[in-house]
Image (spheres, rainbow, N blue to C red):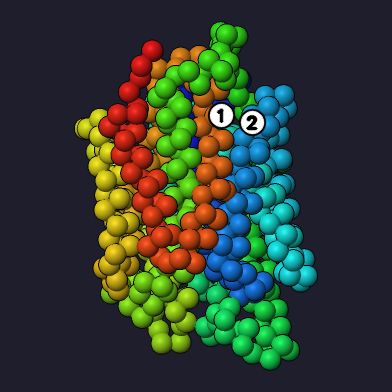
Amino acid sequence: MALPLNDKKTTLKNSESTSYTIPLILVTSLFFLWGLANSLNGSLVKQFQTALDLQRWQANIVETAFYFGYFAMALPAGYVMKKMGYKAGILMGLVLYAAGSFLFYPAAEVRIYGFFLAALFLMASGIAFLETAANLYVTVLGDPKKGDFRLNLAQSFNGMSIILGPIIGGLFIFSEKEYTREMIQALPVAEAEAIRISQAASVQMPYLIIGLVVALVAILFVFTKMPELQSAEESNGKVTIASLLKRKHLVLGILAQFLNVGAQVSLWGNFVDLKLDLAKNDNLWIVDKIYQISDTMSPTQIASFHASFAFILFLLGRFIGTYLMGRIASNKVLGVYAIGAVISVAVAMFGGGLAALLALIAVYFFQSIMFPTIFALSCKGLGDGSKLASSLIIMSIVGGALVPPLTASLFKIGTVAALSVPLLCFTYIIYFAYKGFEIKD
């Protein structure tokens, strides 16, 4: 997820350098790479249920491992880059990302869930480094007046990659023959084992290719001269975490971001299962046309293509939301989007068939602006404390590690119970948008 920036005092050393084209292209590629990793997690949640004989709540620990990596590395990444430079930080992030991707191959051979989780944690740790550096770099590589434009352009590549992730899952990870955990358990032991081996092996090639691409990008960074960043010194000696936590709107914003990411990951990670639960045999006409759905495709593959289409709406929602914020106060736009998300989740909970499926996809549209808008509203009016506050908000991404297992565990009771978790999360965001964001000294 791409982060908005508050630091206006960051500049380039040796800024007389003439061209930033190649560095900008390389930095922009990072947005694509981390979006791909995020959007593939949903495919893993579904695939591991059959490949590793996991219950849905157990498979959702994929998200826990991944987003805990973000949480654990949020502050260390900034420290490393302050001491060693941003290029070194990017290279460290790419190495960790590639290493985690490559570990999928042996993890699939031995089929040990903890091995996969360690690989995901390593990938996310690397991505924490990449996000810390890339969001800042892209705004200063060129005309300072066009920094916001370059950031939005780079974020569009992030949007493209999250659309691609479910397509990769549908074509290369999910098999054309449909299996469920219960079906495999009913088979003879030898046959069930052979299917699980095949299902686990399906993740090897996609992640091997991702690892190779990330490694190639790392090599290009090694041989590309990257301008170093320098920040004007800020008089923040008196700014402490304790003093920041006295700012009510920041505390409420941290909670809003925690719940937002938790709701987002809960829905993204379980979308395929939800599609099969709510509308297994019902498909959207537009998805049939765009993805050329055929009778040879399994319901799981088709569900994955619907997830890809949902991400198209996510990208569309971000563009429309950005346009509206140029004319309407950002908190009001956030409030309208949050109300839309609550209504959509409620329809998905109590509806059925295509109505529930459409509502579930609509949530993606409404959630599109929440992360950057909550981030910006939470950091307003903090002056020299905005940098430290940013780190605290980034750490709230741990909601993506803690909320999804709770959501998944409630599927044992039923879909309505499970979806009540994101419903409550979005309800709180309505409060933050209309009341909690207000700055009170």
Residue sitting farthest toward the front: 413
Q: Position of residue 387 (x, y in %)?
A: 53, 22
> Would residue 248 appear left or right of 345 to someone viewing this image?
right
Q: Position of residue 380 (x, y in %)?
A: 40, 22
Image quadrant for the C terminus? top left
Q: Could you tell me which secondary element the residue under label 2 belongs to?
A: helix
Mark 1 nearby-residue class (10 Å; few <14, some 14–19, many ≥20): some
Of the two numbered discs 1 and 2 on the same chain, state the one appearing first in sequence. 2
Q: Residue at x 36, y 72 (%)?
A: 278
Q: Is residue 236 above or below residue 26?
A: above
> Would residue 244 appear left or right of 192 to someone viewing this image?
left
Q: Is residue 251 visible?
A: yes
What is the count of numbered marks?
Answer: 2
Mark 2 nearby-residue class (10 Å; few <14, some 14–19, many ≥20): some
Q: Amino acid at mark 1?
A: Ser
Q: Residue at x 44, y 50 (%)?
A: 263
Q: Position of residue 183 (x, y in %)?
A: 57, 85
Q: Amino acid at mark 2?
A: Leu
Q: Could you tell me which secondary element the residue under label 1 belongs to?
A: helix
Q: CA distance from mark 1 to mark 2?
A: 7 Å
Q: Position of residue 57 (x, y in %)?
A: 56, 62
Who is closer to the viewer here, 319 or 186? 186
Q: Is residue 37 visible?
A: no
Who is closer to the viewer here, 267 or 37? 267
Which residue, given by chain and number where applicable, does mark 1 sit on?
Answer: 391
Q: Is residue 286 above or below residue 32?
A: below
Who is closer to the viewer here, 328 or 20? 328
Who is closer to the viewer here, 287 or 281? 281
Q: Residue at x 73, y 27 (%)?
A: 84
Q: Which numbered dot is residue 75?
A: 2
**Are discs 1 and 2 less than 8 Å apart at CB?**
yes
Q: Residue at x 42, y 40 (%)?
A: 371
